[in-house]
Amino acid sequence: MDYVEIGRIRKPHGLSGEVKGDIDERFWDDVAEVDAFFVEIKSEKTPYFIDYLRGKGTLIMKFEDINTKEDASLFTSKALYLRRSDINLSEEEINDTGLEFSYLEGYELHVEELGKFGRIEAVEEYPQQEMATVKQGGKSFLVPLRTAWILSVDEDKKIVVMDLPEGLLDYDESEIDD
């Protein structure tokens, strides 16, 4: 069975088993129609039946049989899924994150003056622009994704070359993985 990630649980809320979470707004209509979310537990998507949902944007959720803060804490930072068959969007609409540079996730970042720097783990929207989280040498760096700084993108080799302003990356050259 195919599943689609629709949001994420953040943390417990209160003492009665509620959790706070975020649902991508593209899936709000679908969420209103289902009676269960799926959460990955031990590499299996497990259904959790919804007792109630409240709020907009950040939701407060209560699952059946989850009645304490301790039980709810087991869901901290877990992704929420729906079955693909429960979603009324096309594949294109599901895969469209609205982020211009989301396709760069998984690419290797090369900095013009330095060469290979690290791997782009995630692309997220920040108030001013999209930012790439780049893993390098056990550290994470936030790199602004500005069209003017992107020199080239090799989709076959999954490499993006950027010309970044001096001092943007605070790193020790001896720590750079080759």
Image: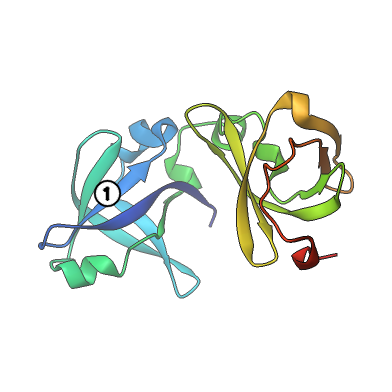
| Quarter of the view holding residue 66 | bottom left
Left or right: 104 as drawn, with respect to 9: right
The residue that appears at 46% across and 75% down in the rendered structure is 42
| Residue type, label 1 | Asp
- Residue 72 pos. (x, y %): 23, 65
Identify whether 91 is placed above or below 81. above
Q: Residues within 10 Å of mark 1 (few under 14, many from 20)?
A: few
- Residue 115 pos. (x, y %): 87, 50
User: Relative to the observer, which residue lies in front, 173 or 108?
Assistant: 173
- Residue 8 pos. (x, y %): 39, 51
The residue that appears at 39% across and 32% down in the rendered structure is 25
For the residue labelled by badge 1, is the local secondary structure a helix, a strand or a loop? loop
User: Relative to the observer, which residue lies in front, 147 or 98?
Assistant: 147
Q: Quadrant of the C terminus?
A: bottom right
Q: Residue furthest top?
A: 148
The residue that appears at 74% across and 39% down in the rendered structure is 166
- Residue 114 pos. (x, y %): 86, 49
Left or right: 140 as drawn, with respect to 69: right
Identify whether 74 is placed above or below 55. below
Left or right: 131 as drawn, with respect to 28: right
Q: For mark 1, what is the residue?
A: 35
Identify whether 53 is placed above or below 17. above
Identify whether 12 is placed above or below 31. below
| Quarter of the view holding residue 130 | top right
User: Relative to the observer, which residue lies in front, 53 or 12?
Assistant: 12
| Quarter of the view holding residue 103 | top right
Q: Residue furthest left?
A: 16
User: Relative to the observer, which residue lies in front, 177 or 175?
Assistant: 175
